[in-house]
Amino acid sequence: MLADLPDAEICTVLVAENDEGLRSAVATVLESDGFATLRASNVSDAVAMLAAFRPDFVLLDLGLLPGSDHDLRPLKGNDLRLSSVPVIAMSGNPRARIPSGATALLRKPFNLDEFLRVISAQVSPSAA
């Protein structure tokens, strides 16, 4: 186990990232801590997986979203069941901001400690 994240075994995370290496690395870290993961390489697959599996939260590369405003509506649509699924945004843009509807932003490249801190806060908000 690489980290000590609370209640990881009950969480499912959708990792939506177009870079296969990063997507795999993020999923591997999460899985080693007991998370179940879903992996999507594009927004269409992410939308389908989000609707079909309703994960506990989503790690989303903002580069997958159309346009430059990083609107999360293409991901969740108008489905009220999905509106409560938290999204942690990831971006390589140093000026990126947390998009409306996201709970946090990870700036790429991020280190393991930063990643685990953000994930831990999502799993157990009182740990933040």
Image: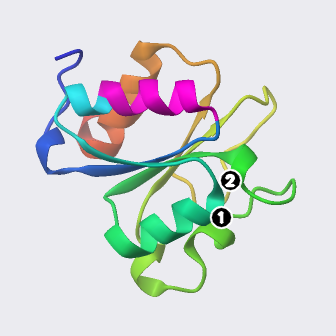
User: Which one is in front, 46 or 85?
Assistant: 46
Judging from the image, what secondary structure is the residue with disc 2 in?
loop
Judging from the image, what secondary structure is the residue with disc 1 in?
loop
Residue under the image location 58 percent in, 86 percent down: 78
Q: Is there any visible trace of residue 128 in the rendered image?
A: no
Q: Quadrant of residue 95?
A: top right
Residue under the image location 20 percent in, 30 percent down: 5
Where does the magenta region start and end? Answer: 19-29
Q: Is residue 22 magenta?
A: yes
Determine which residue is flagged by label 1.
Answer: 72
Q: Residues within 10 Å of mark 1 (few under 14, many from 20)?
A: some
Q: Residue 21 at x, y = what percent?
A: 54, 24
| Amino acid at circle 1 | Leu
Does residue 97 appear to the left or right of 55 in the view shown? right
Q: Residue 128 at x, y = what percent?
A: 34, 34
Q: Residues within 10 Å of mark 2 (few under 14, many from 20)?
A: some
**Which residue ends up furthest to the right in the rendered image?**
68
Determine which residue is flagged by label 2.
Answer: 99
